[in-house]
Image (cartoon, helix red, strand yellow):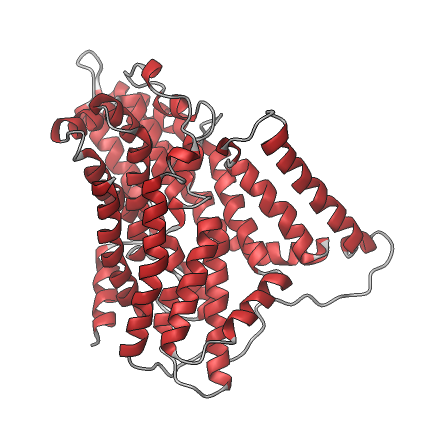
Amino acid sequence: MSFSEKFAKTYKQLLPSPLSIAILLTFLTYVLALFFTKPVDISYSSYSIDLLGSWEEGLWKEGNGGLYFTFQMMLMLVLGHIMALSKPVSNLINTLTQPCTNTANTALIVTLSTILVSLFNWGLGLIFGAILARKIGEKFHQENKPLNYPLIGAAAYSGLMVWHGGLSGSAPIKAAEQNNLHDMVSGMNLNTQHVPSSIDLGETIFSTMNIVVSILLIVLLPAMMYYFGKKERSYQHLPKPTKIQDHDVVKAEGAERIDQSKIFVYLIGTVILAYAFYKAFLSQGQFNLKFLTPNFINFFLLGSGLILHKSINNFVKAADEAISGATGILIQFPLYFGILGLMVGSGLIGQISDWFVSISNESSFPIYSFFSAGLVNVFVPSGGGQWAVQGPIIIASAQELGVSYPKAIMALAYGDQLTNMIQPFWALPLLGITGLKAKDILPYTLLQFLAGTFIFLAGLILF
């Protein structure tokens, strides 16, 4: 049995599906809250009902979180996927395949392009990389050339290790929303007067630390994958050519002509983009980075997707293909908010925050946050879900210790994105498109995980 097969078998034995993990975490949180936070003057039976009420309140949480946030993240993934399926992006992918002549330079090109796209949008980067890897596999199959296809698949997944420090990073963009931090810590015994209502992206995504870390990732990860492409054996089982998308034009009659009208879709897409940029740049009378909210990103992706697909009909076809990738968000996000409701309603979140404070100081807290975020991501494979569960602890602990809020937020972001390399939840769309299995890419993503650990720790320690 090869190393990759042993690693995949061990991983499967240790962890069940992400949905099972979310359910088990809910049960574990409930039990911990029941036995460690019960007031002395309340019976266990009464308190168990109270905890169920807290869980339900978190599950259907209204306002700036809960189902609202769930839908924001679903749209971000689906709209990014829709853009990746458009003809202009497909043409770009075909252009990128031309210089790919061997495993080494292909690994470099796929890693670099996927990282750059993922820094813009994680959903777009994930599907872009998957389709790029698939097209390259088909090209080498047609040309009867050897290729280490699992390495290329892992290169296409590398964007998930940089996304949280990019423009669609859940924690920094949610922290930039007005009153998001206050809403997160509401219900905790915390003086919110000392917690900022929001944190500008200039202090998180566009901070010196994150820019340096991002540059290191952009340079070192492609170089590392190029090196492995030189050393690793070829892999002969390549995908046969197939069409990822099909935009056959059917003769339309009557009102159906609207569905295929370029003028109509260009008009709608342009109006959406114009309004999005007006609200971002002009409505406040001044420019600031707080305009990069999930709503703005989704507005931009929606307008751009409509224009790139050139008709409502093509857009809907792409949406039908893309929507299945959001299943995990739809089902699991409410469970994560239910966990948060349990933790806040019972006071368990305050106890965890106090424990973090007791073992940390101003220097060590970002490091502890980084490692804990990496661990939590293995069980909560979603940056948005993790921000909902762990974000309040990070903010409360940072206030208590006097640690920089932006640095604490980025420590969480780095830990979250790092362990995506060993948590295959978000690899599922990529595996479906490429035809690879998790056991094929995990040995290479594990090496990326080790390299990323050093890069992120260096950034947190030196800045």
User: In the image shown, does 371 or 254 lie closer to the viewer?
Assistant: 371
- Point out the image quarter for the C terminus: top left
* Residue at the far top in the pictured view: 41
Q: In the image, what residue occupies the spot 77% across and 55% down?
A: 262
**Picture quarter containing residue 318?**
bottom right
> Does residue 172 appear anywhere in the picture?
yes
Q: In the image, what residue occupies the spot 34% across and 41% down?
A: 208
* Residue at the far bottom in the pictured view: 144
User: In the image shown, does 230 or 269 lie closer to the viewer?
Assistant: 230
User: In the image shown, does 156 or 314 lie closer to the viewer?
Assistant: 156
Above or below, 151 against 143 in this view is: above
Above or below, 276 against 99 in this view is: above
* Residue at the far right in the pictured view: 254
Q: Is residue 131 left or right of residue 234?
A: right
Image coords of residue 240 (percent x, y):
50, 80
Image coords of residue 76 (percent x, y):
51, 45
User: In the image shown, does 217 or 264 lie closer to the viewer?
Assistant: 217
Image coords of residue 1 (percent x, y):
20, 77
Above or below, 78 against 6 in this view is: above
Image coords of residue 317 (percent x, y):
65, 58
Q: In the image, what residue occupies the spot 24% across and 71% down?
A: 5
Q: Is residue 336 left or right of residue 98?
A: left
**Picture quarter containing residue 402?**
top left
Total residue callouts? 0
Q: Is residue 201 left or right of residue 90?
A: left
> Does residue 381 appear anywhere in the picture?
no
